[in-house]
Every structure is written in C-alpha cells, then in structure tokens.
Image (spheres, coloured by chain):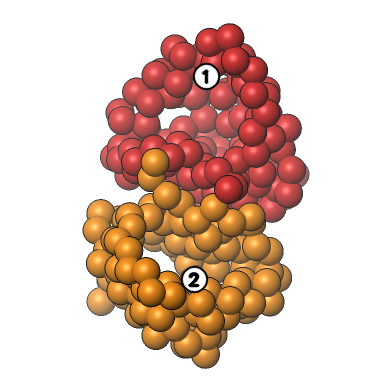
Chain colours: A orange, B red
C-alpha cells in the first residue's frame, strides 16, 4: 500500500472508531499529545488530548447511533504529516431524533511508530 | 528563524494578504495546485486553486474592510507540511454593516522553493 492508501485507511479507521461510540477505540487512532486539537461543528477549539478525549466521551454519552458515509475524500501526504478533506454524510440518533447531516472535515495525521494517527479534526456545517 | 517561526510568519502573511482585499496578494501566499482546498465559514468545500482564487475575488468584491486579530495561534511543523490552528477575531465591513466575528481556522502549509505557502484554509463559526 502507498502512503496515501495508508492515510486514507487511517482516516476510515477514525470514522469506524467514531461509529463504535467507544472512547477506547478513539484511544487507538489518536495522537495522545498536548498538541492534539479538535473542532467539533460549532464547538470552540479543544487543545490537548485530555480535552479532546473528554469531548468524545461527552458526545458518545449523548449519542445512540452514528453512521458515516464519506464523500469527496482527498489525501495529501508529506514525509511525516498528512492531511485529508472529506464530506461526512452522517446518520445519527441523539435521544429519539434521527437526523442526516453533511459536515465538512479537515483531518491531520502524524506518522508514528504505530502507523498514521489523527492529531487534528476540524468539522463544520455547510450553511 | 526556526521552521515554526517561518510557518507562523507565513500564517500572518496569509492574513495580511486577506486584509489587502487584493487577489494578487493572495496569489503570492497560496500554492497554485489542483490539490489546494478552502472552506470559508458555511461555504461548501472548494477544490483546486482556480476555485479557491475565484472565491477570494468574490469575497474581496463584496468587502469594504477586514481586520484580523489572531489569538490562540499554534504551529506544528513537519519536514514538508505544517498545520496551524488559530482564532481569527475579525472586524469587517460588508456593505454598510460593521461586524466583529470569531472564526476558528485550520491552515495547512507546504514547504516550497519560495518558502512556506498555504495550501488549505478551513474556517468555521463558533455557535
């Protein structure tokens, strides 16, 4: 597999971890550093893995189900960093409400000894 | 200057180019490739330099003045790619309306023969 394939797979793995709604799965795909960053749609910037992890726990605690269909996935790979843009078409169930939403995402990955891991996720709504 | 200083300066240069409201200044700071990407707050994903450049022209044609004060700027540098997150505190004048808005931005830079250039900008509102 090329580096681009590896990064695309790391990106898909991030969304599979998201779908499990299990923060232990997120632990496996993220960089656990103070430089990790995350912007959930409409949320303020979260700085550092502890804050990012807490946000996933909070989202997972309030979500019944979430299914992603990715579109427009493009991957750009450097020596030790890579960035991906994609559209997340999301089927989610929060409380009793089922909704379908399109989110634009920028995801940044770092090459680590354990392969590519996500270090930054920026998701936002299209108005 | 360290690589991180150079990238922070490239990031500042992008916002100075934005403030000029002159697309020729944007030409100087962007990567002109098909892989350039841009998400203006609430807009769909723009793919390729031609689409990105057209969007700047459209924004500049409809903006009287724009002043940025950056906060929470963090820089992460790899061998040939770098990524920045920051909060853009924007004073803008569109038509007769002056507004102050906070936008979260992710900016990705490529190391080129002419220094670091922006290849992706993702801006979004905090709700």
On screen, residue B36 versus residue A36, left or right, reads: left
Question: x, y percentage for residue A114?
Answer: 48, 85
Q: Which mark is residue A118?
A: 2
Q: Quadrant of residue B70?
A: top right
Which residue is the site of mark 1? Answer: B25
**Label for residue B119?**
none
Are tags 2 and 1 found on a single chain? no
Estimate the x, y position of residue B27 in percent, counting from the top left.
45, 23
Return the residue found at the far bottom: A24
**In this view of the protein, can residue A76 be seen by the observer?**
no
Q: Closer to the camera: disc 2 or disc 1?
A: 2
Left or right relative to A109: residue A86: left
Q: Residue at x 67, y 28 (%)?
A: B100
Label 2 secondary element: strand
Q: Position of residue A74 (x, y in %)?
A: 30, 56
Classify mark 1: residues with Cα within 10 Å, few (<14), some (14-19) or many (20+): some
Picture quadrant of residue A45: bottom right
Which chain is home to disc 2?
A: A
Q: Element at badge 1?
A: helix
Q: In the rendered view, would you say B94 is above or below B35?
A: above
* In the depicted structure, whether residue B27 falls above or below residue A101: above
Residue at screen point 47% across, 87% down? A22
Q: Is residue A19 above or below residue B78?
A: below
Residue A61 lies, in percent from the top left, at 53, 81
Q: Which quarter shows the N terminus of chain B? A: top right
Q: Nearer the viewer, residue A118 or A4?
A: A118
The structure residue drawn at horizontal position 52% and vertical position 44%, both measured from the top left corner, is B124
Q: Callout 2 environment at 10 Å: few (<14), some (14 to 19), or many (20+)?
A: many
Pick the residue in front: B28 or A44. Answer: A44
Question: Alpha carbon of mark 2 to alpha carbon of mark 1: how far?
Answer: 33 Å
Q: Nearer the viewer, residue A3 or B40?
A: B40
Q: Residue at x 57, y 80 (%)?
A: A57
């Amino acid at each position: 597999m090329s580096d681009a394939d590896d990064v695309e797979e790391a990106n898909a793995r991030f969304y599979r971890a998201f779908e499990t709604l299990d923060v232990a799965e997120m632990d496996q795909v993220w960089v656990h550093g103070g430089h990790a960053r995350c912007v959930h749609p409409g949320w303020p910037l979260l700085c550092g893995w502890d804050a990012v992890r807490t946000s996933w726990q909070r989202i997972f605690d309030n979500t019944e189900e979430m299914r992603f269909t990715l579109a427009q996935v493009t991957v750009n790979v450097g020596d030790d960093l890579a960035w991906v843009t994609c559209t997340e078409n999301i089927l989610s169930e929060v409380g009793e409400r089922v909704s379908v939403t399109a989110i634009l995402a920028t995801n940044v990955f770092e090459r680590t000894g354990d392969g590519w891991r996500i270090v930054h996720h920026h998701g936002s709504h299209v108005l």
